């Protein structure tokens, strides 16, 4: 096992930038942009279909998405929109191949 890498000024600035990033996309905006099912949206956001359904409800059944769900949707939007622009090496890091042997 290797030792953790030290944090330099560059890394500290990148951590600050990431921590304060307001990246987010609403479920309604994502659904308006992409022809997606609510089940697919639930898979993207790693939550239940019932949770996604509550985001679109009115009245007492409404439950807002968390900032994490908004970030998942924004990242999925970027991934779908710019997939061809992502270098293969970075794609492999972002989404490692599934190994069914493990």
Image: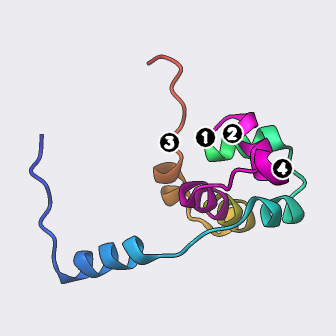
Is there a contact, CB below 8 Å, between mark 2 and mark 1?
A: yes
Looking at the rendered structure, the secondary structure element under dot 1 is: loop
Q: Distance between the residues labelled 1 and 4?
A: 19 Å
Please report the residue visible at 86 percent of the width from the left and 44 percent of the height from the top: 37
Q: Which of marks 3 and 2 is in front?
A: 2
Report the number of numbered marks: 4
Is residue 97 depicted above or below 3 in this figure? above
Q: Distance between the residues labelled 4 and 3?
A: 35 Å
**Label annotation for residue 46:** 1
Q: Which of marks 1 and 3 is in front?
A: 1
Looking at the rendered structure, the secondary structure element under dot 4 is: loop
Q: Does the magenta stretch include residue 96?
A: no
Image position, residue 16 (x, y; %) = 32, 77
Q: Main secondary structure of the magenta part?
A: helix
Please report the residue visible at 12 percent of the width from the left and 39 percent of the height from the top: 1
Is there a contact, CB below 8 Å, between mark 1 and mark 3?
A: no
Give the mark, 3 or 2, whose residue is nearer the N terminus: 2
Which stretch is magenta?
46-74
Please report the residue visible at 53 percent of the width from the left and 20 percent of the height from the top: 100
Is there a contact, CB below 8 Å, between mark 3 and mark 2?
A: no
Is there a contact, CB below 8 Å, between mark 2 and mark 4?
A: no
Looking at the rendered structure, the secondary structure element under dot 2 is: helix
Q: Name the residue under label 2.
A: 43
Image position, residue 33 (x, y; %) = 86, 65
Nearer-the-camera pick, 64 or 24: 64
Q: Mark 3 points at which residue?
A: 96
């Amino acid at each position: 096992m290797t030792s953790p890498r030290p944090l330099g000024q560059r890394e500290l600035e990148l951590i600050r930038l990431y921590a304060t990033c307001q990246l987010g996309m609403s479920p309604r905006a994502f659904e308006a942009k992409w022809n997606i099912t609510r089940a697919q949206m639930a898979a993207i956001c790693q939550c239940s279909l019932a949770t996604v359904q509550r985001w679109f409800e009115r009245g007492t059944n409404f439950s807002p998405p968390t900032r994490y769900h908004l970030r998942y949707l924004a990242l999925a939007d970027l991934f779908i929109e710019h997939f061809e622009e992502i270098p293969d090496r970075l794609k492999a890091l972002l989404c490692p191949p599934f190994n069914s042997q493990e």
